[in-house]
Amino acid sequence: MGSPHVFQLRFSQHWKSPYGDEGTLTAGYEFLGKPIAGPYTIPSGIVATATPVIQYLFDHVPLIGVMTTKSIGPVPREGNREPIMLQYAPGCYMNAVGLTNPGADQAVKQLSELEVPSNRFLLTSIFGGSLEEIVAVAVKLAPFSDGLELNLSCPHAKGYGMDMGQDADLVREITSAVKSAVDVPVVPKLTPNVPDIGAIAVAAAEGGADAICAINTVGPASYSAYGEPVLTNILGGKSGKGILPIALKCVKEIREVVDLPIIGCGGISNADDVRAFAREGVDIFGVGSALTGMKSPEIKAYFDCLHQDLVDGSSQSAALVCNDVEMDFKPYKLVKNERITSDISILTFDGSLDIRAGEFVFTWIPGVGEKPFSVLTDDPFSLVVIDVGIFTHALLKLEAGDELLVRGTYGIPVDITEGTRIMAVAGGTGLAAVYQIARDFGNADIFMGARSKDRLYFVDECKAVADVHIATDDGSAGFHGLVTELVSEHLAAMSADERNNLVFYNCGPAPMVHAAEKVEQAFVSGNKIFSAIDYLTKCGVGICGSCHTPDGRRLCVDGPFLTGGQSV
């Protein structure tokens, strides 16, 4: 069997400078017979959970040589209600996403649209509730994959993952069955939550595994704040810096008993961690939780720095990791619930909130869930809420004295060049986001849209900071028609010089934002249009990928206002 010494020697020989005179990556790597551009992956379920994000990483971060998808099952799963992630100590996280996925049939369509570079390995993670389900998913997805990762390790989805991966005989049987059904490499992902992970690795190897991935999250465990379990699922898997010693122990035990390539993950955040995994015989290095809070361009900068650290013997990449993102909750008591209509309220709380225009927060009602909101006013802290689902329905029922828990702020603050004329277009709760912009920067027009007069709110406050233009679908106030039609008329009446000085901020429901962008693009270039859409993000720190856009940006860390008409 392979020894740590042998693999350390192999690693040392491998880490010659991969950069040519022009600073371009020149050295080659290989994984399971395919040349790859770099020896890193992002573990399944982190950041690259949607094909647009995967394509973005393919196009911009070549050092991620092995691209691992989210785990895909036989049928669609919505997963768990938020909160799905928490930070229990600096750099230490817990999550219970719940195997959210589109199902195998939809995944086939999505994966078929990817443009996979010739030097990247697409490792598709799969799961199922039985051997038969796993094989069926494998057969569907293998033609669109360079390899299949078998999720035998998820600790928080009953009947899946770890429930199978703790049984060596079942691991052997599943691996063998999938190997017999497909003609691509098979990589079981093992759980650390077993007495002897080496025995599980041997079973996987006996089943025909081409490589081993270790480890998945540790647990399950639970964590409470203000006397309530934070995760809606209550139980979640632990990741991040705190599980590094466990991961190193596991890969050491695996290397001692099998001579297969190992994808090592669990707590890697800097070059010293990569070196430690390499000494234990790891071939591909998975970086996951360390990416928490990073904007998309920052991910590239991080991997570049991490790799250069390994070439230079330095450790500069550690400084690029945010080990203490803002995820703690602060309680606020409701002072007033001002009803606008039966389904719209302005909620005003005790105290203020330090927030800049463009940023947002998450609000949490234990036992119900959490959702992101733009803040209507910061002092006093207030929100506008429209009843669109379970969580907002519960918010509208709050009474004076009731408590709401808030975390954040998140997102990139708005920065506007002096002298620019702001055109803010809002529908629904989107007014909260654009009101802050107009209030803080001035020189603004606010276009407010509503179905009818009775659904308008905060009009006088908006008039105090901007020129206000109102449109109602039924004509009961202002322009009779859609707010985007009013915007179009207003722009058509302006001169070219006037339009040249405009910048647009759109916020509201997706159909309205799309329509606004279409109107605006007829008059100005896309780099003057910034858009955000309500209720897309789940984690707020860039990890779950649920708020991805068509070009692979993530709303919570790259936005919420995004340029170029790429808001969804």
Image: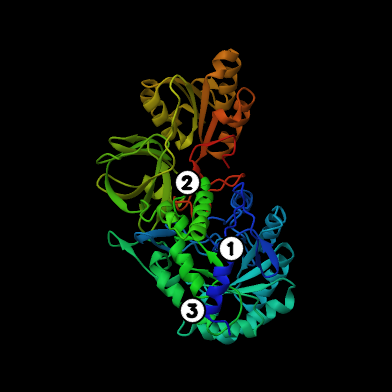
Q: Is residue 301 left or right of residue 231?
A: right
Mark 1 — residue?
A: 39
Residue 252 disc label:
3
User: Residue 546: x and y, percent?
Assistant: 53, 52
- Res. 144 visible in picture: yes
Q: Is residue 129 left or right of residue 89?
A: right
Q: CA distance from mark 3 to mark 2?
A: 37 Å
Quarter of image, res 441: top left
The amino acid beneath tag 1 is Pro
Mark 2 — residue?
A: 556
Mark 1 element type: loop
Q: Is residue 61 left or right of residue 193?
A: right
The amino acid beneath tag 3 is Lys
What residue is rendered at 62% in x and 44% in y?
A: 550
Picture quarter with the C terminus: top right
Quarter of image, res 387: top left
- Of the two numbered discs 3 and 2 on the same chain, state the one appearing first in sequence: 3
